[in-house]
């Protein structure tokens, strides 16, 4: 397998948009434990986001602050700074859900402690000598973030169109959190990949880090869903299985198995670019109507912000 690109990824210029962090806030006191009525499995499968994202997105920010000196393109630098601001806000917003879960009898601490260890220790900074070794580890993590962002953008695009959640009476505050976050993931879906291409871009590294990221995400997600189902105080014998995930996908309350599988060869295609997937216009349209995002915009204007 050659390490050079035989096909150059071509971004869709119209999908690029200047990025800004929105200082959103959510109130959780009226959100039930099973925010999708009668469906604890879907509820907890999506709730895994609250377990993974606070530590994961803090890690994104930490890595990107280290890679800023390697950026030689001013527009990309602005995109990365906007990305850092958005991801920091995502981490905070999901982190604030955890005390609400704990107050409802579902303490996430045992699982989040493991996730913190993964990002802070296993994927954190290592004691390496300056030079090639240290740069190699930084580039590995930059490539891994690009692979993870492929899936966060996939999920963001999915939740923006997941009308079945509305039809089944999903809690509006949780839906707004998920769709505000999903819309921003679609907004900045190209940044991580563009940064990877700018500082490295090796195809072998892209494939290798995709395999690591995909395996870790599948493992952590199924483990997190099982943790929630087994520790849900309202369930007598809470279980989670791939069959449940497949069934929920067919019902429209989770992404379909087929859609997730088809996303793999797209990312591994040599001509792949994230701007070729999803719709910035749909993301921006949701953000223009999101209760949390519009409230944040009004507050920023009131304070003299942009």
Image (cartoon, rainbow, N blue to C red):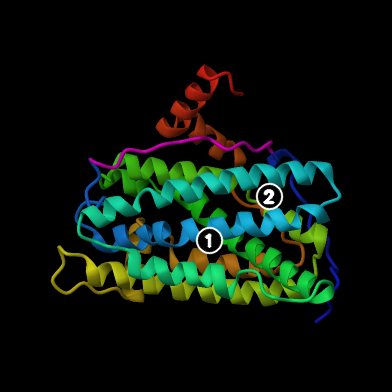
Which element is circle 2 on? helix
Residue 242, numbered circle: none
Q: In which quarter of the image is the C terminus?
A: top right
Occupied quadrant, residue 5? bottom right
Q: At which x and y percent is residue 104?
A: 20, 54
Give the labeled residue for mark 1. 56
**Relative to 25, residue 168 above or below:** below
Residue 275, numbered circle: 2
Q: Is 138 placed left or right of 120 in the picture?
A: right
Q: Residue at x 63, y 47 (%)?
A: 84
Q: Is 167 placed left or right of 215 in the picture?
A: left
User: CA–CA distance between discs 2 and 1?
Assistant: 23 Å
Give the camera-side residue of 189 and 160: 189
Q: Main secondary structure of the magenta part?
A: loop
Q: Which residue is drawn at 66% across and 65% down?
A: 267
Q: Would you say residue 18 sits in the magenta stretch?
A: yes
Q: Would you say residue 57 sits in the magenta stretch?
A: no
Q: What stretch is highlighted in magenta?
A: 17-29
**Relative to 23, residue 230 above or below:** below
**Residue count near mark 1 (Cα–Cα under 10 Å), binned few <14, some 14–19, many ≥20:** many
Occupied quadrant, residue 4? bottom right
Q: At which x and y percent is residue 114?
A: 43, 72
Q: Is residue 273 visible?
A: no
């Amino acid at each position: 397998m050659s390490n050079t690109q035989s096909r150059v990824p071509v971004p869709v210029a119209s999908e690029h948009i200047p990025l800004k962090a929105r200082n959103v806030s959510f109130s959780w006191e009226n959100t039930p434990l099973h925010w999708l009525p009668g469906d604890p499995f879907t509820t907890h499968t999506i709730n895994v986001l609250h377990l993974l994202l606070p530590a994961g997105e803090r890690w994104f920010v930490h890595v990107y602050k280290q890679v800023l000196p390697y950026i030689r393109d001013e527009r990309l630098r602005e995109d990365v700074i906007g990305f850092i601001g958005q991801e920091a806000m995502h981490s905070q917003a999901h982190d604030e859900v955890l005390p609400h879960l704990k107050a409802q009898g579902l303490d996430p601490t045992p699982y989040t402690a493991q996730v913190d260890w993964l990002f802070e220790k296993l994927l954190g900074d290592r004691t390496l000598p300056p030079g090639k070794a240290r740069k190699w580890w930084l580039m590995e993590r930059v490539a891994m973030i690009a692979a993870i962002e492929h899936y966060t953008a996939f999920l963001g695009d999915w939740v923006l169109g997941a009308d079945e959640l509305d039809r089944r009476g999903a809690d509006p505050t949780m839906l707004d959190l998920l769709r505000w976050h999903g819309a921003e993931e679609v907004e900045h879906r190209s940044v991580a990949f563009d940064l990877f291409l700018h500082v490295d871009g090796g195809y072998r590294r892209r494939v290798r880090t995709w395999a690591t990221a995909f395996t870790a995400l599948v493992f952590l997600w199924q483990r997190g869903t099982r943790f929630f189902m087994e520790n849900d105080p309202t369930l007598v014998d809470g279980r989670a299985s791939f069959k449940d995930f497949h069934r929920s996908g067919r019902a429209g309350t989770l992404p379909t198995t087929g859609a997730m599988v088809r996303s793999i060869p797209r990312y591994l295609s040599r001509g792949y670019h994230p701007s070729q997937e999803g719709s910035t216009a749909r993301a921006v349209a949701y953000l223009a109507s999101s209760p949390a995002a519009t409230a944040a915009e009004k507050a920023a204007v009131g304070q003299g912000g942009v």
